[in-house]
Amino acid sequence: MKEPAVSADPTQVLAFDTDCHIFDGCGFADVSPGLHSFLFQPLLGDADSSVYFNKTMLLALLGSIIIVGFFWAAFRRPQVVPGKLQMVAEAGYDFIRRGVVYETIGKKEGEKYVPLVVSLFFFVWMMNLWSIIPVAQFPVTSIIAYPMILALIVYVLWVSLTFKRHGFVGFWKNVTGYDKSLGPVLPLAMLIELFSNLLIRPFTHAVRLFANMFAGHTLLLLFTIASWYLLNGVGIAYAGVSFVMVIVMTAFELFIQALQAYVFVLLTCTYIQGALAEHH
C-alpha cells in the first residue's frame, strides 16, 4: 500500500496522490476526501497566531466585490427602458422584494427590510456558487463560521425589533409563546418556546445552510476523485459512471445553491414578521 498523501501541517491543503489508481496497490482511502478537504494553508499571515488570510476569506471578499460591482454597473445609469444588465439586476431584486419580503412581511412593513434581504440572498448565493466555479471550487458557506455570522445578524435584528415593537414584557411573551388558553401546560409550553426561539433558532438557521453546502461539496469531491482513481484497467467503465455522477451532482448543486439562499432569506423574513406581528 502507498502512503496516504497526508501533510504534517494541519492547515495545508492536502494534495491527493495523482498516481493512485485502482489495481495499482493503493486504496481509495489514500485519496478520498475528508475534513482535510476543508482546511487551507494561509495565503497571508500565520495560522498559529490565529491572524491570517486564507482561500475562503479571499473568496468571500471577491464574492462581495462581484455582487457590489454587478449592482453598481447595473444601476449606475438607470434607464426607463432597461438594458440587459439592468433588466437582470431588476429581475433579481424584484423577485426577492415581491416574492419573499412582500409575501412574508407585507409591503408596508417590509419595504424597509428589502435592501437587507436582497443583500443576504445574493451574498449567500454567491458564496454557494463558488463550489462549481473553476479554480475556486469551494463553497464558502461550507465553513460554519460564515453561516453563523449571517444567522447572528438576523438574530440580533429579530431580538431588537421584538423589544422595540412590544417592549420588555411583550418581548418575553413573544419568545415564550405566552397564551393563557393553554391552561396547565402553559409553563412547559413557555419553556419549550423560550429554548426554541432563543437558542435553537439561530443554530438551525446557520446549520441548515452549512450542512447542505458541506454535504454537497463532499459528494462532488467524492465522485470527482473516484473518477480519477477508477481510471485504470477495467475500472475505466466505472470511472465513466462516476464522471456522469459528477455532472449530475454539479447540476443538482446549482439548484441547491439557489434554494438554500432562498430558504435562508425566507426564514429571515419569517423571523422579522414574527417580531413585528401584533398577535402571536
Image (tube, rainbow, N blue to C red):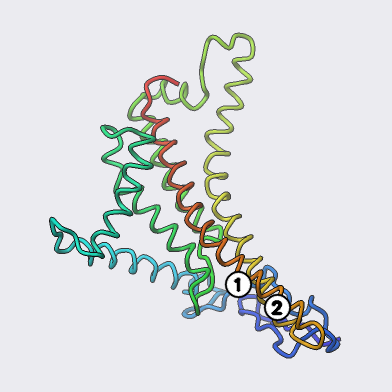
Image position of 245 (left or right of 198): right
Return the x and y of residue 216 as percentages of the image width and height: 61, 62
Quadrant of the image occupied by residue 194: top right
Residue where numbered disc 1 is placed = 39
Quadrant of the image occupied by residue 82: bottom left
Q: Secondary structure at mark 2?
A: helix
**Disc 2 versus disc 1: distance between alpha carbons?**
29 Å
Pick whichever, 77 or 113, lies toward us.
77
Return the x and y of residue 108 as percentages of the image width and height: 26, 32
Return the x and y of residue 62 as percentages of the image width and height: 38, 71
Return the x and y of residue 230 as percentages of the image width and height: 76, 81
Mark 2 is on which residue type? Gly
Pick whichever, 167 or 36, lies toward us.
36
Image position of 53 (left or right of 229): left
Q: Name the N-terminal-most of marks 2 and 1.
A: 1
State the residue at coordinates (44%, 71%): 59
State the residue at coordinates (39%, 67%): 63
Residue where numbered disc 2 is placed = 240
Mark 1 is on which residue type? Leu
- Please, is residue 115 above or below residue 68 in the view? above
- Please, is residue 173 above or below residue 61 in the view? above
Pick whichever, 64 or 175, lies toward us.
64
